[in-house]
Image (cartoon, grey):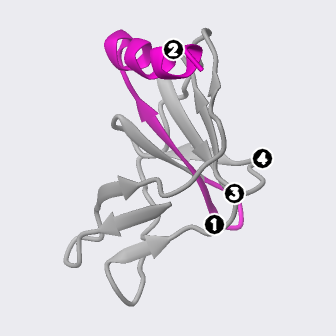
Amino acid sequence: MELKLDRESDALVDVVLISAGRPEVLVEEVALPAGERVVPVLRRPDDVLTVKGPVRVRAFANVLWFEWDDSAGARLVGGGPVRLVVTDDSRFVGLVVEWGKQQYDEFAAQFSRS
């Protein structure tokens, strides 16, 4: 997974999933806490942050959830439709994207056929 950051603001502007296993497609919704208002800064020498290792993808009815490290005890940060999953020791271990019914249905249909 590659995350593109704006060089000046460090805002997350693009996410590219290069490779992942088959996603889990679940029908239930996940109750998301409001999330903390403070978002950790993801500074890197260039404008692309590369996540290595297996990426777990779970499609819930209301969110698409990506995890690439142990997230036990992690919390959500950010208040918009995209939130970061961060551990107490400030490791960035996941990304959560809220979506609507249409996006979920289209995504789920791709994996129910195969």
Q: Which mark is residue 54?
A: 3
- Crowding around mark 1 (Cα neighbors within 10 Å: few <14, some 14 to 19, many 20+) is few
Residue at 60% x, 49% y is 20
Between label 3 and label 4, give the one nearer the viewer.
3
Q: Tag 1 or tag 4, which sits nearer the N-term?
A: 4
Q: Give the amino acid at mark 4.
A: Gly
Q: Give the amino acid at mark 2.
A: Ala
Q: Is residue 103 magenta?
A: yes
Between label 3 and label 1, give the one nearer the viewer.
3
Whole-number angstrom distance, CA of label 3 to CA of label 4:
20 Å
Residue of label 2: 61
Q: Give the amino acid at mark 3.
A: Pro
- Crowding around mark 2 (Cα neighbors within 10 Å: few <14, some 14 to 19, many 20+) is many
Q: How far across and how far down the image is residue 21, in percent?
A: 66, 44
Relative side of 67 to 48, left or right: right
Which image quarter: residue 3? bottom left
Q: Tag 1 or tag 3, which sits nearer the N-term?
A: 3
Q: How many marks?
A: 4
Whole-number angstrom distance, CA of label 4 to CA of label 2:
23 Å
Give the magenta part as a residue range. Answer: 86-114
Q: Is residue 82 above or below residue 25?
A: below
Q: Which mark is residue 90?
A: 1
